Image (spheres, rainbow, N blue to C red):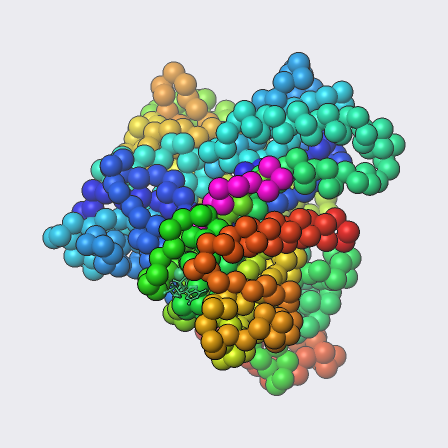
Amino acid sequence: MPEAAFIVQLDDFQGFIVKKRHPSSLALTETMLNLVFFEHQQGEEEAIRDSDIEGMRIASFAMEVFPGWTVCFVLNEDDVLEEISEELTGMGRFMLELMNADPESLEIEEILAKKSSMPAVDDEQKAAAIFMTPSSALLLERLHTEGVESTAKLSMWLKNQIQSENVDLLEAITPLMDSGLVTVEIIGKLETAFLMKDVFPHRAPPVKSFKATSVAHPNLMPRYEEYLKSFFSPDPPTRGYNPTLPVTDPNSPILEDREKIARILSNSIYYAVLDCLRNGPLRLGQIASQISFPDGVVQGALWAMEAERIVANFEEEGVWALITNPKMEIFMPEFILPIIASKLEEKKVGSDTARRYLELLVQTWSE
Amino acid sequence: MIRSVYILGQEGDVLYSKEYAKSESKASLVEFLVNLVQFLKSMDLEGKTEFMNVSISRIFFAQRELFTFVFIADKADDAVQIEDKMTQLVETFMKDFANLATAKQPLDGFDSKVDEIAVTMVKVAILGFAGVGKTTTLHLLRGETLPLVHDPTIGVSIKRLPEEVQNANIVLWDLAGQSRFSILWAKMIANAQVVVIVTDSTLENVLRSKKLVTLVKDEVPEAKVIGIANKQDLPTALTPERVGQILSIPTYELVAIDISYRDRLIQIIRKSILEGKAEIKAA
Ligand SMILES: Nc1nc2c(ncn2[C@@H]2O[C@H](COP(=O)(O)OP(=O)(O)OP(=O)(O)O)[C@@H](O)[C@H]2O)c(=O)[nH]1
Ligand SMILES: [Mg+2]
């Protein structure tokens, strides 16, 4: 495994800036930085590339979401890239996320030693991205009532909603497509968007964690129960969290809260910490070692989630527990079928479109 | 460098903002600034400039009466220099524009004052096909020994000009001209205030370079573009007028291997920077 690495950013003004390096004696030239950067310009996707530069073997990693940033590992003679590329990808992803979230706490040496890694963005996080882009969330609402619609009409509708000509449908629809909620196909001559999946962002009671607590930390139970009760079912007249209230209800927690949930879930660092706690309460050190993150990073994530009432700290015991479990629940939008049926009747969509929708739905949900 | 400038009112309302270069995501930044204003109400900075680090940026702020002034800069910047600029900004604003802002009037003329204070770095990109003399031009501008052989540039070579223009550092981006590097050009000229398109003044090369002019106009429409008719010492050279006609941009003659051209070239670039600024002002 590599013992040397560096992180470089191409700044539009100042050019290549080596932000971190280990060991500090690692000598780098402008040509090396150029060649590494150039490697990644030849394909856009998230990938590991290897180059042989000035006698150094470098495996480099870049992500589309962080343009201009590259993580480079200096390979040893006996390293076989194919064998370690998965590990390097995970570490590379971790370093770029951390560089973005909390660069001060990033120590390359520590990351290499612990092999701190971050998995690829998963479906829940992809769905969260929808609620981070207001126009995407709007578009999703529109598709709830339309089910199927031509992209031209969607674009017009969106412009109307936002009262601006500067609406980029592609930008709005991309998170919906990336998360698999929407499929776009050409039907006849019309580019058409189909709603394949729906998503319900909400906070679920942390059932699994609660059960695990009763076994591992029975002494926490009374206080843990109190936390959950005050959030989900407080004594009247206070009303508990009820995500099924319609958005139009002033007591509905959905609108403002779903953005909070989305923000937490789409932060890959918070997400990794959260995912650990879903299984049961843990000490900070336990979380850090489970996911091989530096302590400081885990601490930051816990504080951020404490502020959003997702985790709570049992100070005496030094344990953190999940008190609400933010979720992006994905389900089949069967409510669309009657909508399509009546659109078909009113000749708002053709039978080929309706048939295609059914086909797609079966394909998506049959596994 | 100073990446952006914000002036906020008492309620965290943005009275003025200008972005010179990308920094963190803008939405979260504004949200942060509004919180900052609220927070600052509870303490007294005594007219001093403070800063804090946020991710890769350093945020400088000062308060005077009801206004909060903010620079987003880099951690690597010289804090004393930026604090100095903050003092200038605060004084300029309080003297001539605070009343306008309070009365919700447009801040006519303030923008160019901000430019004078906050522009600390000007990017000049040197673009052209392989072997036309870009790297030679870069060395000439820097007053360095001129290389006589063509050692093709890899990617980009970034160097500062020893002289400042109006207190701003000039950063020269000498791009690689070999065709395999052409995928980098659009990215590398981003945020350039001036783009210098170098040709070797042969008909074939000048005709090809028309494509570069189009690229620059598409990618950085606000940039000032100038042409260079290099290698005027060679018998095959078209006149600078002819080169300028073909490229349809103001074009100047050059013999990059002749040191006596240095001052002239620096003046040309200087003039382009100043003209570029004037045009932005007028717009
Ligand atoms: N005769 C003559 N030769 C020149 C002049 N300017 C540059 N050269 C020569 O042209 C060759 C190429 O110059 P470079 O400056 O390296 O070319 P470049 O444009 O940087 O090339 P790339 O980096 O590959 O894009 C060198 O041998 C220079 O000495 C000039 O004005 N007259
Ligand atoms: Mg060169």
Q: Quadrant of ligand 1?
A: bottom left
Question: Residue A240: percent from the left, percent from the top?
Answer: 61, 34
Along the line of sight, the residue nearer the viewer: A103 or A200: A103
Q: Taking A365 as reference, is A112 left or right?
A: left
Residue at screen point 66% across, 35% down: B117
Q: Is residue A266 above or below residue B212?
A: above
Question: Residue A26: percent from the left, percent from the top?
Answer: 25, 41
Residue at screen point 82% across, 41% down: B108
Along the line of sight, the residue nearer the viewer: B122 or A292: B122
Q: Is residue A94 visible?
A: no
Question: Residue A88: percent from the left, percent from the top?
Answer: 27, 50
The answer to which image quadrant residue B71 occupies is top right
Along the line of sight, the residue nearer the viewer: A63 or B100: B100
Along the line of sight, the residue nearer the viewer: A292 or A244: A292
Residue at screen point 67% across, 48% down: B274
Question: Is B163 within the magenta?
Answer: yes
> Which residues fall within the magenta stretch?
B158-167
